Image (spheres, grey):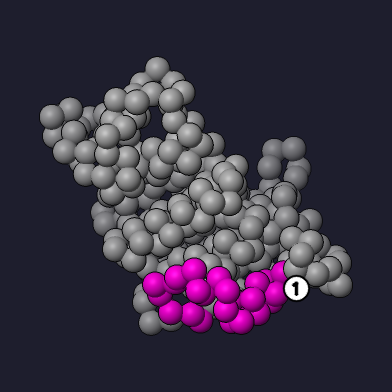
Amino acid sequence: MNNPPAITLSHVSKVYANGTLALQDVNVVIHQSQFVSIVGPSGCGKSTVLRLIAGLGRVSSGHFDWGIPQQARKLAFVFQDASLMAWANVRENVRLPLKLAGIPKKDAMSLVQNTLALVGLEGFEKSYPRELSGGMKMRVSIARALVTQPNILLLDEPFGALDEITRSKLNRDLLDLWSLYNWTVLFVTHNIYEAVYLSNRVLVMGTSPGRIVADIMIDAPYPRSEAFRMSLAYNEYCRLVAKHLAAAMGNPKNSILQF
């Protein structure tokens, strides 16, 4: 990878107050502009990695270093639950981080409108969350992250609760935006098919304790069409990720269909 590092985790471990060892000796370098997915069983510490990077917790030992200077570093976090304000319309939900940052409303509205157009929500500015589908709610959540104009995007299973058709559409839209804005992306998912389609790198985590057990480069060009999902290369990458995931779960004979 020729791009310089964005984030380097060195011997990172995390122990919670109740004694749970969530992460142990995690070592990984995420390069600028990479799309990196993290897959693993529930409880392996995938979300913990994102939260530590986002500053939503402290490492117990080890450290992580930034390759992007603090003044140039802008993070955004998209959670699994859209967590929209039910009493506010789409426009006001997206404006929230700008409002919290003290940006005047008249200055914020052009950013909000441009971001809504970017995620395909033009015409829904005055709609309320109760009037939106699950996929549209997630678009609002993504827009709320993007309105801050980040260069590092952390996504914690944002499409996990969506149907496959909506999920596939949002996968394609996310890749289009990543290609346009050159973000560094860390994307947590349980879905190996999604991880392989989106990423140029997949990290596989094991549990008890949480650790990285495989680091797989997905050497396939972008843009990735639906033809890629049907290709032999895609199938082989999915099998490789599934093999490492099964081994991490202590069942190396499991087939890809069980994931």
Magenta stretch, overall SS: helix
- Looking at the rendered structure, the secondary structure element under dot 1 is helix
Residue 139 percent location from the top left of the image:
41, 42
Residue at 65% from the left image edge and 79% from the top image edge? 236
Residue 237 is inside the magenta segment: yes
Residue at 28% from the left image edge and 30% from the top image edge? 125
Please give the count of numbered marks on the rendered protein: 1
Q: Which residues are magenta?
A: 219-243
Q: Is residue 96 visible?
A: no
Indicate the quadrant where residue 16 lies.
top right
Residue 50 is inside the magenta segment: no
**Residue matched to label 1:** 243
Indicate the quadrant where residue 34 lies.
bottom left
Residue 129 percent location from the top left of the image:
43, 26
Residue type at mark 1 is Lys
Residue 117 percent location from the top left of the image:
26, 45
The answer to whether 147 appears left or right of 6 in the picture is left
